[in-house]
Amino acid sequence: MELGPLLVEGLLAVGGRAIVETDGWYVTYVEFPGDVDIFIQRATGILQAISGTEILEFRTRRLAHEDWAETWKRGLAARFITERILVRPSWIAAPTNTAQV
């Protein structure tokens, strides 16, 4: 059986949010645990039990807190899809120049 889906299942089981495969690694984000060593031990046990393998390597790093409910909006803007049809995110005000729309 392929190991990837089992690792994804395990990462979700230990609190992972979304999981992405990058350069052979499965990457996820979790809330910062009170004790990183205990979290790694717990995660290792869960992943080994789910995957049936003991060959696992973890890399961790702490990231600065970001408000992802707002961060994902960066770079999104109103766009004309035709000369007269504008598609815009709900948090961006509609243009007041009605000749444009």
Image: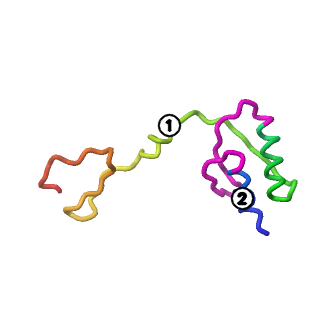
Q: Residue at x 28, y 63 (%)?
A: 81
- Nearer the observer: mark 1 or 2; the answer is 1
Give x and y (percent) for residue 46: 80, 49
Residue of label 2: 24
Q: Which residues are magenta?
A: 13-38
Q: For the residue marked with disc 1, what is the amino acid?
A: Asp
Q: Residue at x 63, y 55 (%)?
A: 20
Q: Secondary structure at mark 2?
A: loop
Q: For the residue marked with disc 2, what is the amino acid?
A: Gly
Q: Residues within 10 Å of mark 2 (few under 14, many from 20)?
A: few
* Horizontal side, residue 61 vs residue 43: left or right: left
Any mark on residue 67, and which? Answer: 1
Magenta stretch holds residue 55: no
Any mark on residue 48, and which? Answer: none
Looking at this view, is 89 or 84 the one in front? Answer: 89
Quadrant where the image shows the N terminus: bottom right
Main secondary structure type of the part rendered in magenta = loop
Q: Secondary structure at mark 1?
A: loop
Q: Extreme top residue here?
A: 34
Magenta stretch holds residue 22: yes
